[in-house]
Amino acid sequence: MVKPAKPVPEGLHTVTPHLVVDGAAEAIEFYKRAFGAQEKGREVGPDGKSIMHADIRIGDSAVFLSDIFPNMDTQPPRKAGTTTVTLHLYVPNADEVFNRAVKAGAKPTMPLMDAFWGDRYGKITDPFGHVWAIAQHIEDLTREEMDKRGREFFAQMAQQPQPAS
C-alpha cells in the first residue's frame, strides 16, 4: 500500500527557486562559501559529471540547482545575457554575508545601505550571473513611516547629478 504524501514535502516551502547554472557543481561550492549553504543531495546526469538536480539549503530555505540540459526551456543568466529574478536573502548580519560573498567571488552591484524600508540592504551578482539581494531587517516601521521615508529618499535622489549617457 502506498503511503499518502504531503503536497509540499517536509522541509520545503510553497515556492522554491530552481536555478539553472553553467557549472552547477562550482555554483554549489560558491554558495557554501558565500552563504553557508548545506548540500542535501544531487542527482548526476548520464555523463556522470553534470548535475540534473541538486538541493541546497541556505538558512531555512531550499534552493534547487541544475546544469544546462538540451531541450530544456531555461537558460542560465550568463548564457541568456540577463536575469529577470533577484533572490532576496534575509540574514542575521548583512555586512558579514555581503563581504563573504564578495570575497568568494561575487560582484557587488549595489553597496550595502540602511534602506528607507527598515532593512540593511545591498546586491551582488554571483559568478554564475544570478542576482542576490542581501538584507538584514534592522527596524520595524509603519506603512506611513515607510512611505514618508520613501518620498524623502526619492526626492533626495532627484537632486543628485545624473551620470552622462
Image: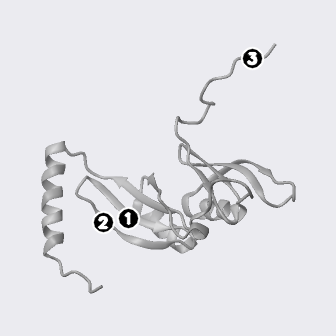
> Disc 1 designates what residue?
122
In percent of the image, x 70 and y 65: which residue is there? 23
**Where in the figure is residue 64, as x and y percent of width and height?**
63, 49
> Disc 3 designates what residue?
3
Q: Are marks 1 and 3 in contact (CB under 8 Å)?
A: no
Tell me which numbered mark, 1 or 3, is placed earlier along the sequence.
3
Identified by mark 2, the residue type is Met
Q: CA distance from mark 1 to mark 2?
A: 6 Å
Q: Are marks 1 and 2 in contact (CB under 8 Å)?
A: yes
Q: How is the image coloured?
A: one colour
Tell me which numbered mark, 3 or 2, is placed earlier along the sequence.
3
**Where in the figure is residue 54, as x and y percent of width and height?**
70, 50
Which mark, by number, is residue 113? Answer: 2
Name the outermost residue toward the right.
47
Q: CA distance from mark 3 to mark 2?
A: 50 Å
Q: Is residue 36 above or below residue 112?
A: above
Identified by mark 3, the residue type is Lys
Residue 17 lies left or right of residue 4; in this view the side is left
In percent of the image, x 52 and y 39: which residue is there? 15
Which quadrant would the C terminus be assigned to in this image?
A: bottom left
In percent of the image, x 72 and y 49: which residue is there? 53
Residue 52 lies left or right of residue 135; in this view the side is right
